[in-house]
């Protein structure tokens, strides 16, 4: 399957558009439309529910995007968050040298410049004076907002190690070559969780989180065969990591990282202790010991997960000689759970359909559609990934039941209007 089909469906159906499109767009930035933002919110909610709401050992926070510039010195980003950049002397295109390993310039075969390190952090100035003292950065990861708040969270929440802090938020990286639609962008969102553990137990927790996170994609409905695990070898490991695993997905443009799971040791808290002069150790009352916790991090991209859901859900089918495009998104994250359709615009059917719309709205994201033949409305429903189509027909006028069509099987069942909320609720939870 080609990416163009996904990109064009996203544009046509209002999932995702190029940012500032009327001005020609801006590289590495995308906007989410009505269906896109609903899908994105649902994915974030799905993550938050499993990582925070359903657990007693993880607390949520929402830290600021602009932080004290010393944070990024302590974290190592000012020194080390850079990619090697090369230019082609002939075609003038710019590349990440590690993308080209073992290859010459892919398009023209021209000679490349020496690699130079390019820091990926966006710089800005805070306040009205634009001098070096006012330099600040847009955060390139959400994790640091968690580390610097370790003591702020542990006290009011009365958590004890092992426990975690989770955050969803925007991050910014001035990527040398943003590409593959929303896979690599300059502005994106992360869903990160940092789990603080006693040194010596980090190996077990690392294994635990690997399993948990893989399971999450399974529950999300991602096809098992498409997910891969990739262990980082010594030379791939980031400066802070003792062990690292990527959860990867087989995208049309290659097997690529969705999420990183890292054993960051006591690197982050030790560095922040050193740079801030504040005590970031933990006192374990049970064992009467004081130590700097080790951290197991799970770091996923919202946009990459969303792209993975779209790619994984997309299929084309022939039904009775007619082609249909279906986004088989799980009911747990589909932008709209159901479409509500009066079969015809008379005999009181639109009024009943509107009544059903009002009945379902407080519980679920649904939409009313009276435009075109019911077949066309079903096709639109399929492309938008809406799992159920609820049709008010002549039978409804007699017995207050409706036809519910399943997007995937196209089977139709009759459900009483009064039972609809319960019926749909069961479908989301199953
Ligand atoms: P890559 O090697 O692809 O640049 P990374 O290893 O630097 O990624 P991390 O720093 O581990 O990525 O970031 C954690 C997660 O954040 C990634 O798994 C990905 O889902 C997401 N992410 C990172 N960079 C981007 C980006 N430029 N665009 C979209 N998502 C991103």
Image (cartoon, rainbow, N blue to C red):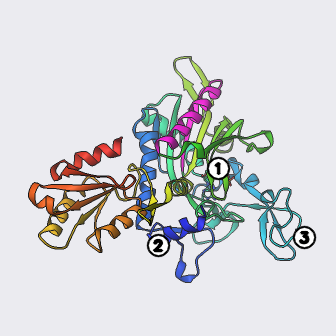
Residue drawn at x 38%, y 50% as measured from the top left: 331
Q: Quadrant of the C terminus?
A: top left
Ranked by sequence position, the earlier of labels 3 and 2 is: 2
Neighbours of disc 2 within 10 Å: few (<14), some (14-19), many (20+): few
Ranked by sequence position, the earlier of labels 1 and 3 is: 3
Instruction: Say which quarter of the image contains residue 36.
Output: bottom left
In this view, the residue farthest toward the top is 287
The residue nearer to you, when weighing 106 against 195, is 106
Q: Image check: 374 left or right of 19? A: left
In this view, the residue farthest toward the left is 398
Neighbours of disc 1 within 10 Å: few (<14), some (14-19), many (20+): many
Q: Which residue is mark 3?
A: 111
Q: Which residue is mark 1?
A: 257
Q: CA distance from mark 3 to mark 2?
A: 40 Å
Q: Is residue 195 magenta?
A: yes
Q: Secondary structure at mark 1?
A: strand
Is the stretch drawn in magenta largely helix, strand or loop? helix
Q: Which label is found at residue 12?
A: 2
Q: Which residues are magenta?
A: 191-220
Residue drawn at x 49%, y 55% as measured from the top left: 313
Q: Is mark 1 within 8 Å of ligand 1?
A: yes
User: From this viewpoint, is residue 293 visible?
Assistant: no
User: From this viewpoint, is residue 382 visible?
Assistant: yes
Ranked by sequence position, the earlier of labels 2 and 1 is: 2
């Amino acid at each position: 399957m080609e990416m163009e089909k996904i990109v064009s469906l996203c544009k046509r159906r209002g999932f995702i558009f190029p940012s500032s499109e009327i001005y020609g767009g801006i590289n590495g930035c995308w906007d989410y439309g009505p269906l896109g933002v609903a899908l994105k919110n649902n994915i974030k909610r799905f993550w938050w529910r499993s990582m925070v709401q359903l657990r007693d050992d993880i607390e949520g926070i929402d830290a600021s995007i602009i932080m004290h510039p010393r944070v990024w010195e302590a974290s190592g980003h000012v020194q080390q968050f850079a990619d090697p950049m090369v230019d082609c002397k002939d075609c003038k295109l710019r590349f990440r040298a590690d993308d080209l390993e073992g290859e010459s310039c892919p398009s023209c075969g021209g000679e490349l410049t020496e690699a130079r390190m390019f820091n990926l952090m966006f710089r800005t100035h805070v306040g009205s004076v634009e001098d070096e003292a006012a330099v600040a950065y847009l955060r390139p990861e959400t994790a640091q907002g968690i580390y610097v708040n370790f003591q702020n969270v542990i006290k009011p929440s009365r958590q004890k190690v092992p426990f975690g802090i989770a955050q969803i938020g925007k991050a910014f990286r001035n990527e040398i070559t943003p590409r593959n639609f929303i896979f690599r962008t300059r502005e994106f969102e992360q869903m990160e969780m940092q789990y603080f553990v006693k040194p010596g137990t980090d190996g077990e927790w690392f294994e635990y989180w690997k399993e948990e996170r893989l399971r999450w994609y399974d529950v999300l409905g991602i096809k098992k065969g498409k997910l891969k695990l990739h262990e980082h070898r010594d030379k791939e490991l980031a400066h802070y990591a003792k062990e690292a695993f990527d959860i990867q997905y087989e995208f049309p443009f290659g097997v690529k990282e969705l999420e990183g799971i890292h054993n960051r040791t006591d690197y982050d808290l030790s560095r922040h202790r050193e740079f801030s002069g504040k005590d970031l150790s933990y006192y374990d009352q049970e064992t009467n010991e004081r130590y700097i916790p080790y951290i197991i991090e799970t770091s996923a991209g919202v946009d990459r997960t969303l792209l993975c859901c779209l790619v994984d859900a997309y299929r084309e089918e022939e039904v009775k000689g007619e082609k249909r495009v279906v986004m088989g998104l799980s009911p747990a994250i589909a932008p709209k759970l159901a479409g509500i359709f009066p079969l015809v615009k008379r005999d009181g059917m639109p009024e009943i359909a509107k009544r059903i719309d009002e009945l379902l709205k407080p519980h679920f994201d649904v939409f009313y559609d009276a435009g075109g033949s019911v077949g066309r409305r079903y096709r639109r429903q399929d492309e938008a990934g809406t799992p159920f189509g609820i049709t008010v027909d002549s039978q409804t006028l007699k017995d207050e039941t409706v036809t519910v069509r399943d997007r995937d099987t196209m089977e139709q069942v009759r459900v009483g209007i009064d039972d609809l909320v319960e019926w749909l609720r069961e479908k989301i939870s199953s």
